[in-house]
Image: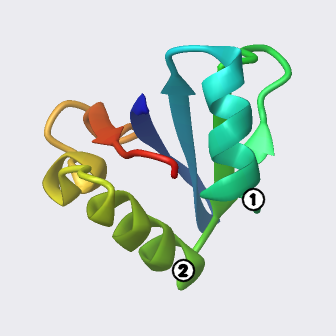
């Protein structure tokens, strides 16, 4: 299973972040949501995507999970191209 993701920074006084993962199909998003990412939210606008929203320390735990699934931490946390978004990253994993 493969998903492309991106982190969005929210500087609204108190820092928060949103991470979106877009899978290859709505079915893949559903399987990932029910097994690997049960606390995430299914996207209404994009049925093949799931989202996470929160702040520290939950953000660090979420990033660690994504890194274990193959995401590049430097890309997730990058501000090289925008102060509002990290660079796009990819995760790949197999559900048994």
Residue count near mark 1 (Cα–Cα under 10 Å), binned few <14, some 14–19, many ≥20: few
- In depth, the one of 60 and 55 nearer the eye is 60
Q: Quadrant of residue 35?
A: bottom right
Q: Which residue is mark 1?
A: 38
| Circle 1 or circle 2, nearest the eye | 1
Q: Residue at x 79, y 14 (%)?
A: 45
Instruction: Pinpoint residue 18: horizontal percent, then vertical percent.
Output: 59, 48
Q: Which mark is residue 5?
A: none
Asked if residue 40 is positioned above or below residue 90 in the image, the reply reads below
Q: Residue at x 14, y 40 (%)?
A: 80
- In depth, the one of 18 and 69 nearer the eye is 69
Left or right: residue 93 versus residue 42 is left
Q: In the picture, which quadrant includes the N terminus?
A: top left
Instruction: Pinpoint residue 9: horizontal percent, then vertical percent.
Output: 48, 49
Pick whichever of labels 1 and 2 is earlier in the sequence: 1
Q: Which mark is residue 56?
A: 2
Return the residue found at the far bottom. 57
Return the residue found at the far front. 96
Left or right: residue 82 versus residue 41 is left
Asked if residue 95 is positioned above or below residue 15 in the image, the reply reads above
Per the image, label 1 sits on a secondary structure element best described as: loop
């Amino acid at each position: 299973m493969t998903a492309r993701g991106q982190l969005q920074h929210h500087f609204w006084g108190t820092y928060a972040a949103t991470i979106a993962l877009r899978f290859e199909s709505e079915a893949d998003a559903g399987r990932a949501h029910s097994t690997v990412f049960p606390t995430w939210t299914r996207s209404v606008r994009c049925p093949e995507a799931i989202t996470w929203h929160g702040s520290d320390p939950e953000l660090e735990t979420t990033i660690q999970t994504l890194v274990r699934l193959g995401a590049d931490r430097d890309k997730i946390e990058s501000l090289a191209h925008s102060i509002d978004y990290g660079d796009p990253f990819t995760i790949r994993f197999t559900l048994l």
